[in-house]
Image: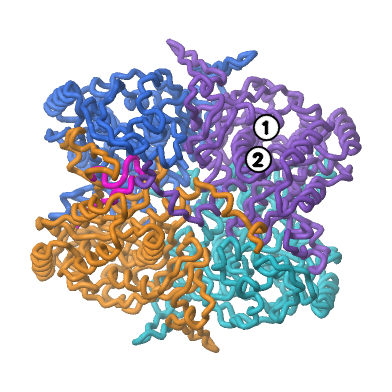
Chain colours: A orange, B cyan, C purple, D blue
Amino acid sequence: MEILGGPLFAVAGAGESHGPAVTSIVFGCPPGLWLDRAQIQAYLDRRRPGSNRHGTPRHEDDTVVFLSGIYQPDHAALLAGPSITLDTNPPQHTETYASGYSTGEPIAALVLSTSKKSAHYEQFAGESGAVRPGHTDLVKHYQSQGFVDFRGGGRSSYRATISDVVGGSIARLFLQAQFGTFILSSICQVGELTAQRSLSEHLFALHQQFAPNPIPLAALQALQTQLASAEIWTLDTNFADQAGELIKQIRIAGDSIGAAVEVVAVNVPALLGEPLYNSLKVRLMGVLGGLNAAQACEMGAGLQAVSRLGSENNDPIRNTGYQQNAHGGLLGGITTGNPLTARVSFKPTSTINLPQQTVQKDLQEIDFALAKGRHDPCVGVRAGVTLESRMAIELMNAVLQHQASRVHTADFNLWQNQP
Amino acid sequence: MEILGGPLFAVAGAGESHGPAVTSIVFGCPPGLWLDRAQIQAYLDRRRPGSNRHGTPRHEDDTVVFLSGIYQPDHAALLAGPSITLDTNPPQHTETYASGYSTGEPIAALVLSTSKKSAHYEQFAGESGAVRPGHTDLVKHYQSQGFVDFRGGGRSSYRATISDVVGGSIARLFLQAQFGTFILSSICQVGELTAQRSLSEHLFALHQQFAPNPIPLAALQALQTQLASAEIWTLDTNFADQAGELIKQIRIAGDSIGAAVEVVAVNVPALLGEPLYNSLKVRLMGVLGGLNAAQACEMGAGLQAVSRLGSENNDPIRNTGYQQNAHGGLLGGITTGNPLTARVSFKPTSTINLPQQTVQKDLQEIDFALAKGRHDPCVGVRAGVTLESRMAIELMNAVLQHQASRVHTADFNLWQNQP
Amino acid sequence: MEILGGPLFAVAGAGESHGPAVTSIVFGCPPGLWLDRAQIQAYLDRRRPGSNRHGTPRHEDDTVVFLSGIYQPDHAALLAGPSITLDTNPPQHTETYASGYSTGEPIAALVLSTSKKSAHYEQFAGESGAVRPGHTDLVKHYQSQGFVDFRGGGRSSYRATISDVVGGSIARLFLQAQFGTFILSSICQVGELTAQRSLSEHLFALHQQFAPNPIPLAALQALQTQLASAEIWTLDTNFADQAGELIKQIRIAGDSIGAAVEVVAVNVPALLGEPLYNSLKVRLMGVLGGLNAAQACEMGAGLQAVSRLGSENNDPIRNTGYQQNAHGGLLGGITTGNPLTARVSFKPTSTINLPQQTVQKDLQEIDFALAKGRHDPCVGVRAGVTLESRMAIELMNAVLQHQASRVHTADFNLWQNQP
Amino acid sequence: MEILGGPLFAVAGAGESHGPAVTSIVFGCPPGLWLDRAQIQAYLDRRRPGSNRHGTPRHEDDTVVFLSGIYQPDHAALLAGPSITLDTNPPQHTETYASGYSTGEPIAALVLSTSKKSAHYEQFAGESGAVRPGHTDLVKHYQSQGFVDFRGGGRSSYRATISDVVGGSIARLFLQAQFGTFILSSICQVGELTAQRSLSEHLFALHQQFAPNPIPLAALQALQTQLASAEIWTLDTNFADQAGELIKQIRIAGDSIGAAVEVVAVNVPALLGEPLYNSLKVRLMGVLGGLNAAQACEMGAGLQAVSRLGSENNDPIRNTGYQQNAHGGLLGGITTGNPLTARVSFKPTSTINLPQQTVQKDLQEIDFALAKGRHDPCVGVRAGVTLESRMAIELMNAVLQHQASRVHTADFNLWQNQP
C-alpha cells in the first residue's frame, strides 16, 4: 500500500505523473494543531519543478486544497480556500478549507495536474515502445502485464512526492509547535564539486551553544532564509555558484549529474524509536535512502565511521549532552536529543538527451534518443524538501509511538470533567 | 488509520459529514481490471440518502470522479469523466478518468459535498452545546479536546461510508470477473415485522442446483433487479409494503425503528482466510458488525446454533459440496465455496424528533429536542450496499492473500519473455 | 500473520494443536508493569481443557514459562521460574523468569504440550483420510496443498488460544493497575436453557451505584469468586446445575450442544477507539465473534435493538453518566465509560460420536464415525476466559492508541532530567 | 512491534541479550517447503560470536529448536530434534521438530542462552550506574523510566539478530528452491584496508556469463566455500590476512575498528517491489542500513553515482539484460533480475577497553573504564549472515506480494478437484 510512515502518523498517496491529480490523506495528526493552507503551500512550492532555475523548466502550480480533517468555528475563515467546481449537470461546487485546527480525523489534500503534454510520450507506447535506460519502463511494463500508464513513471515518478511534502508539512508544524523541532537540508555535493561548509557541523555547533536548551527559532529561521537565497540550497555560496554553472553546462550538453544532500533536524525530542526491527534508524534509512534516484544513505559519521577507531568514534558524554555527533542523533536507533543528521546520495537524472543503447518492451534492441520532453539534469538539487518531509513524518510517528508507552490516567476522563 | 481491509486490498477514507468532500484511495487492485465510472456510480447511487423513499430526504448527488490508477491508450475515452476546475488565478482545470484498465497503482476517487446546511447545527456548538443521545457528540468532544467538527459525526457519520462503497465496487468487479462472485443483500426485519422469504435460503437453493458449478450470472442479475424493484430491498413484497408503511408512520411520529439485513455472497472462491487471528470470520464479523448503528452480526446459523445439537448443526458433505449451510460458507474462518451468509442487526436511528433527557458538553443536564435537521427513521434499510461492499473488500483481500501462498515461477519472468 | 490486536499492543502466536509447544510473543506492554508468572498461570488454568468437569477429559498442564521482557534487580527472584533443559550434548540449561517489571520489550511465553496421542488420528491421514464434518479438515487440506498437519486443526484448534490468554492476562493486569478495569464473563445459555440472572445487568447496576467513581475492586473480586464456584461459570446457580446436567446427558448421547456467553468489562477508560474503520466496535466484533465456533456477536442491546423504537433505545444522559446501557459502552465505536458488554453465541462442538455423512479428502463419499478421541460436548462453556482476554487485548491497544494523541512534552526529556 | 519484514513474510523476535532465550516466530512461509533443522543451524553457526577468531571470545552454542509449523507423516523423523524438559513437578517433556514440510502456519524457533555472566554488569546498575559511550544505556534508561534490563542492550543487542537469521534462513531456502536465488556477503573494508576483489563485480560477471539463464548452483556453492575458508569472509585472501592482523592488534590495544560489507543476491526474480513508499529499495535500505552499528547503506553504484554523468551511470540494455549494474538490481525500487547489490558500513564496536568520558544515568559526569566483559573489536566482520538474512526476508516478502497481484483461478478450487 502506498503509505509513508505509520502506524500512527502516516500519509497515503495516489496519483501518477500524468494523471489528473495527486491525492493525499494524512492520518494521525492529533487534534488541536493549527493548520494554514499557506504554510503547506510554501513547502510544496519548494518541491515544485521549476521552483529554482536548475530544476526542470516544466511549470506546475501544485496548488494544494484541503478537503477534510480541519475545523474552526469561524466558517468563513475555515472555508476560504480555492473553490472546486465539477462540470456535472447541474455543476457541483464546494469551498475548501483554508485554515483551522486539526480534528484528529484524516486530512485529505488534493493537487491537480495542469500541464499534461502526453504527446511527448508516443515513442514509449505498446510492445514496440522504447525503454528509457535508468527508468522503470521495462519492469513496470512486465510487472503490470502491459497495463501501466506508459506516459510517465506512475507512482515511481517524482511528482508522487507531493504526498510526502503534504504529510511532512503537517508533521513539522506539529513537531515545531510541540518541541521546537526544525528540519533543514543543504546540497553538499554536485558531481565532484563539494561544499566547504557543512550544514550538520554548523547545526551541531549551534546545538552545543544552547544545550541542553533548544536552539532559538529565530536563529533557525535566519539560517533557512540564508539557504533559500543561494543559487542552490546550501550554506556555501561559492559552491552554489560553481554548482549552478556546472549544472547549466551539463544541461546544455544534454547530460545529467549526481548530487548529495544533507538533511538535519534540531531540537529533536529524545527517547524516540523502537529497539531493533522498527528502530528509527531502520525507518529513516529506508525512507531517505529509498527515495527515487537515491543510491545511498548515511547517518551521523556515515562512511567515515569505517576507518575510525572506537576511541575516536565514541562520542564523549557530559551532563549537557554528547560532545560530538558521530552518532548523528541516534544510538541503537533511538534519539538522544542531538541533531539528527543524514546524508543522501543521488544518481544523475536518468533522462538525458544523448543517444543510448536500449531495447523495446518486446526486448528488441534499439538505439535510442529522447524525442523531446522535460529534462531536469540534477534531480538531487530538488530533493531537499522531500527528504525533510520524510524525516518529519518518521519523527512524528515515533513521537506518537513513544507517547503511547506513557499512559496518563487523566487523559481518559470524561465524567470527572464536570464543572 | 482510516483504512478498511488490507494489507493487500484496502480503501483509505477521509472526509467528515459536513466537509467539502469524501476522498477515497483504493490500494491493491491488480493490474488489468476494466473499470467504468458508471459502474461504481451505480453502487454509490444505492448508498445515497434519498435513493429510496425511506431514507433521509436530504438530496446528495454523490457524483464520483476518478483521479488516478486507471489507464487506456485511448486518451479521449480515458479522460471522459466530469472535469474539475479550481478557482485559482488563473483557474486550474483537469479532465478526470471515465474508464480504463487498473494499472495496479492506487485509485483515488473524489465525491464532493454539495448540500451543507450547517446552520442547523448551532444548538450543538461549544461547551454549552447539546449532546444528542445515541450519538458520538460527547465522546468525540472530549476525545478531541473540543476540536471536533461538531456539525456532524465526523468520520463516524454515515456519509463516510462512501469510501466503503468505492472500494467495495472495485472489489466486486474484480471478484465477478475472476470467479463470477456476486453479492446481494436483503432487509429481513424492520421492528417486529419479519420477511417470510430469506435471501440466504433462496441463494443456497440456487447454489445447490448448480453445484459444483457456479450459479449463472443471469439468474443473479435477475434476482438483483427483483430486489431493487421492491418498496424496500427484499424478496418478500408483502413484507416490503408493510415495512414501508411502518417506517412512514414512525417518521410521522418523530421516532425511529431498528432493522436487520442479510448479506450473501455466492460463487465464492474456496480456501480463503488465515487460520485464527486474521481468519475471514474475524474480519467479516468486524467490518459487518462494526458498521455504524450495527449492534449484532451473525454468520451462518447465527444465534440459532446455540440451541442446536451438533448432529443437527454439522453440515453433511457429499462430493458436490455441503448439503446444508449452517456454517454460512466459513469453517474455521476459511471459505468452503458455499454461499457466505451474514445477518446484521441495526439499532433504530439515534436522531429522533421527540424530547429526550441529555446533557450539554459541560455535563450540565438539559431537556433536549432537535431544532431541525435531517431525519432518517430506519438507517438499517439503507445499509445493504455498504455491507455488500465491506464483504467484497474482505473477500478481495483474502483472495490476494491466498494467492500469495501459491508462487508460480513464470509470473516473475522478464528476460525469458523474449519473442 | 497470526497476530491478535495491534498495532500497539498485540500478541503473536505459533503452535498447532499436536505440536511440541504453543509459543506467544506479547508486544507493546509499557515498561514498569509488575508481572508475576502465577497471575498469568491462573488465567491459563481457567482456559485449560479439563479445568471444569464439562470440558474435554484430556489433561493438559499448560504450564507457562516466561523467556523475555521482564526484569527486576533481584536476579534470584527474577529467575525463579521453572528451568528448561535441552538434551543437546552437553545439555543446555536455563532458568526462566518468575516475576519482575515489564521492560517495554517483547515478552515471550512458552507452553509445552505433553499429551500428544497422535495415534487417534490415523483415520484422517492422506488423500483417503476422512473429513470431519464441521471441521476445517477439507479446506485446510486443499489450502495447504496437502501439507497440513492432519492430526488436529493446526492453528484453528482451540489450543492455539493459549496465546490469547497470555496476551490478555498482561493486558488486564495493566488495565486493572492503571484504571481499575475488570473483565468478567458468564454463561447465559446452553441449548435452550437460559440463565435468569444477567451478568451485564448486574454489573450495570453496580456501575450506576458508584458512578462516576469506579466500582470497588473488592466487589468485583467477590463476584469473580462467586462465578468460579458454580457448576459452570454463571451467576444463576439453578441454571448452572440444569445446564451441567444437560451437558452430561448430551455427552453420554455422543452429541454436542451450543452455548452463549456474556463478557463484560467495567471501570472502562472513556474515549477509546478510532472513528470508523478501526473503531473499537469493529475490533471487538471481530475478535469476539470471530473466535473458533462462534456464530454471532452482539454488543449492548444486540438483536433486541432491531424491534425497539429510537425513543426507547437511546440511553438518557445525566451528569453522572448514561442511565441505560443499550449502547453497551460504545457509541460510534468509542468507549463512553459505561460497562462494555458483548454476548457471543457458539455452535455445538463439531466433534461428536454419532455417525455422519462426509467425504474423504479426495471427495469420495463415506459414512463416518469417529474412531476415538477427545470430545468436549459444549465448547462455549469453556470460552469465557478467551473472550475476556480478547476484549482486554483490544482495550489495551485502544488505550495506547488514544494516549498517542495526547502528547506531553515532559515525557520526551532526557537532559533536563538532571538532579 | 519487533517484526522484521511483512506483511506477508515476516519474523517476530523476542529475547534480550541476557535473558533465558531468543524466541522467533516466522510468518508466511507457503506450505510445502522442505525444512531441515541442520540447514537453519548452519546459518546460525555463522552468526554466532566466536564462530570465527575475530569475533568475541564468548562461546554461545545457539542451538535452535523448532516448535511449530512443520510436518511430515513420518513422526519419528519429524520429532528427531533435541528434546526439551521443564522441571515442573512432574517434569514436562517434549520432542522438537527436526525436519518436515512447512504447513503454511507460523514456525516458532527457540534458542536458549547458556552463558550469562551477569556479574560483569554491576557497574551499570541503578541511577549511579555508568553509561557506556556509544551504547543505548542512557536513552533506554530514560525511555523505559528505569525499568530496562541494564545488563545488556536488551533487544538492541546483537544477540537479538538470531531471529533475523532464523527468518532469513527459511526465506533463502524458499527462494533457492523456487528461483535458484543465492545470497552471499563479503567484507570489503576494515579500517583503512580495502579488499581488491569485489564480490559484487565478481557476481555480476558470472551473471553476464549465464544471462538470461541463472548462474548454476554449483558455481555459487563453490564461491561460498571459498569465502568461508578465508581468515575473514572475503574473496581477497591477502586482504583477509592483513585485516585479521589489524583486528588482532586493535584488540590488544583495547580499541575497536569499523568495517564495510558487501551483500549480493543473484538469480533474483524480476518484477518485485511496490512503487514508491514500500519499494524494495526503501525496504532494503531500511533493514540493511538500520542494522545495529551500521552507519550507511549503498545500493548499486552507491556514493560513486554522485560524481557520475547520466551517460555513464545509465546501464545500457541488450536483449539478455542490463550491461552494467550501476542500478544494483533495482530500478524505481523494483527488481530487474540483475544481481541485487548493497554495501553496508559499520562503525567500530562501541565497547572498548580504554578510558572514556561519560556520565552516570543521573547525568553526573564520570571517567569511565570497562570493569571487564566481552569485547568484539570489529562488529562488522560478523554481520554478513545477518545482512544476507535481512535481504532474504525482504526479497521473500516481495515475492509473495508480487504473486498476490497475479490471480490464478485454478488456485482456488476445491470441489472441482474431484478424481
- Pointer 1 with pointer 2, Cβ within 8 A: yes
Question: In the image, what residue type sits under mark 2?
Answer: Ser
Residue A9, horizontal then vertical, whole percent: 45, 57
Q: Earlier in the sequence, mark 1 or mark 2?
A: 1
Disc 1 marks which residue?
A: C43
Residue at 17% x, 25% y: name it.
D250
Task: Determine whether the residue tagged by mark 1 lies in a helix, strand or loop.
Answer: helix
Residue D4, horizontal then vertical, whole percent: 42, 41
- The chain to which mark 1 is attached is C
Tell me the magenta residue range. A325-347
Residue at 47% x, 52% y: name it.
A7
Rendered view: D163 above or below C312: above
Q: Quadrant of the C terminus of chain D?
A: top right
Query: In which image quadrant can residue B72 be found?
Result: bottom left
Can the viewer see residue C238?
yes
Q: Which mark is residue C389?
A: 2
Relative placement, left or right, of B137 versus D349 is: right
Can the viewer see residue C357?
no
Residue at 21% x, 75% y: name it.
A57
